Amino acid sequence: MRRVAVQAFRSARRPSLRKFVRNRNITLAPSGHALGLRSISSRRERVATTLLTSSMHIRGFSVALVSAAVASGAFYAYRGTNPNSSTSTSTSTSLSTEQSRSLSASNVYSNSPQASPSSATAEQASESTRRALVVGQGSLYTGTITGDGPLSKETDDYGRKVLEMLTPEQATQKLRKNEESWLVGRGKGVVRYDVVQIPSNDPIEDDHAEKIIEVPQGVAATNDGSLASDWMFWGVFDGHSGWVTSAKLRQTLISFVARELDSTYKNALADPSLIFPTAEAIDMAIKTGFLRLDHEIVHESVTKVQKAQSKLVAAELLAPALSGSCALLSFYDSRSKLLRVACTGDSRAVLGRRGPSGKWTATPLSVDQTGANAAEAERLRNEHPGEPNVVKNGRVLGGLEPARAFGDAVYKWSIKTNEELKRSYFGRTGSAQLRTPPYVTAEPVVTTTKVEPEKGDFVVMATDGLWEMLTNEEVVGLVGQWLEAQADGKRGQGGRSDSWLKSWFSAQKGLPVEQAGPDGDKSGQRAPIRQQQWGIKATQNDRFVVEDKNAATHLVRNALGGKDQDQLSALLTLPSPYSRRYRDDLTVEVIFFGEGNTTGNVTLNQEASASSPDMKAKL
């Protein structure tokens, strides 16, 4: 940062920039985490730029420096290639990089009387314009490019990257690239679920899985005379330090849990006094499935590696142990209409339910399990007495943010195992605070909720990337807004609304959600820190929009910008790893309960899904 500050100071002293720095007009929020807007005017060019700061602070005079980078790195490259330019093509193309940069700065910032405002306006009108994005160490700048040629310079001398910003159409295409929507015609209380993923890491470290299992009466008794019931599973997995653990969970977690549930239900059938397992037995079955899978990932892998004595085997088996993943799994039993949510880590599930007022209410079905959670911190201190740094700066041993996770074996292996594996094969360096492992567990906290399909309940499950941007109430209100728009749209087309949409329709404007009171239970629920980072101050009516047929995509669009198309396009333009400064991987699922048509099938909802031949029904 010191070197950057020195460079910025030197740049601010350049003659071509001095007058601009002295007279610039910048509007910023009181905090350094702000979204400010400013305009730069001259006789030759007019460039509008927007600043989006991250948690890193940039001094005021570096604003001029980055703006100059936009001009030198992109804008004036067109002066030599555009036939409408007043500068000769042969002359411009023969200029060296430094000469071109000098010319660009003087054209933008000088007040030379040689070019009249009217001629500049006419010249601008004859040239096409596009949007550009400049990525700095701690800030983003958007601006207008004049010309239609390719960007000639992606990075300037100060390490900033210059990109052509996605158009609104391209941003929408990227949002919808991985969306899925499934219509569930099982007649068991679930009518639809929507999914979307937006990567920030490359490759994306999130994953997800869905499965519907038809359970015969001989395995899970029914009390309504039906021959079978459905077990429905939805899971979102937020990986960290790599994608391997979350991919392992996608492949195996539902199967591990279903196997334990199968055994538990069969044991209840064998006991004449039970017929159905107790609530405690079902919760324990889910926890056992989680813990057995994690034991296979973390400990059985070590046994196999030590037996094989092969680095190739170690590379394959230890990868899911060395990286990590949070897991959020929902299990719905169609017989009992009970939804169990098992949470390991800091992904979150929230229930939306229509209240007596006609508005929706948001009820969290999980707690964010991080070192910053007082209950989790107390648990860790009780398990590791005499270790004052077991939770430090809201992280386990000062390093890992989730207090519960799959993998992350360096926090679970003994000190001896850590050292042996690193010496003989490879591994991650454990914390210097490591004393009495394990510090991290995959045991989930399980909540149980009675679902009311007749009221049109819905559940939103998402990795923490969404909850960094939106509150529980905003998420539920946005889905409510989306439902009303879908129902209204069907009416407007002269068609009949689907029954599950029609019953939810309301004439409410804005977000139809009850706001949490000052005494609402916020324990374990982190605030959406990105709103502060981006300096969002607009009201809900000014922020949110309905443009998507997929409810999960609708949530992500509004989380990233909504009506603010520049912010949305900028955040989606950012490539990895720059994007991680401003947003995380995003995986969102929206599950709709209701009493829809019974076809017995699960089919792809084409209008809300990306076209992909690989999509298969989850039944």
Image (tube, grey):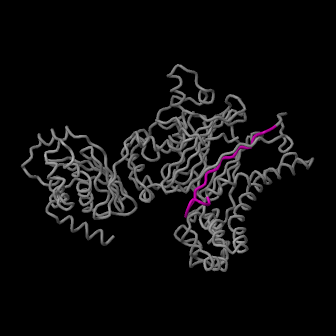
Residue 6, how many percent across, how many down? 26, 71
Instruction: Name the foreground residue: 133 vs 53.
Output: 133
209 shown above or below 138:
above
Q: Which residue sits at x=23%, y=59%?
A: 64
- The quadrant in which the N terminus is found is bottom left
Is-magenta flag for residue 94?
no
Q: Does 518 sit left or right of 458 as displayed?
A: left
The chief SS type of the magenta part is strand
Image quadrant assignment for residue 384: bottom right
370 shown above or below 478:
below
Instruction: Name the foreground residue: 355 vs 502.
Output: 502
**What is the residue that sits farthest to the right in this orientation?**
272
- The quadrant in which the C terminus is found is top right
User: Which segment is the magenta one?
Assistant: 228-245
Q: Does 86 sit left or right of 244 as displayed?
A: left
Total number of numbered discs in the rendering: 0
Instruction: Name the foreground residue: 450 vs 358.
Output: 450
Image quadrant assignment for residue 55: bottom left
Q: Does 331 sit left or right of 474 as displayed?
A: right
**What is the residue that sits farthest to the top in this orientation?**
494
Is-magenta flag for residue 233?
yes
Residue 174, how many percent across, how many down? 46, 44
Residue 341, how many percent across, how many down? 67, 50
19 shown above or below 358:
below
Residue 105, how many percent across, how many down? 18, 57
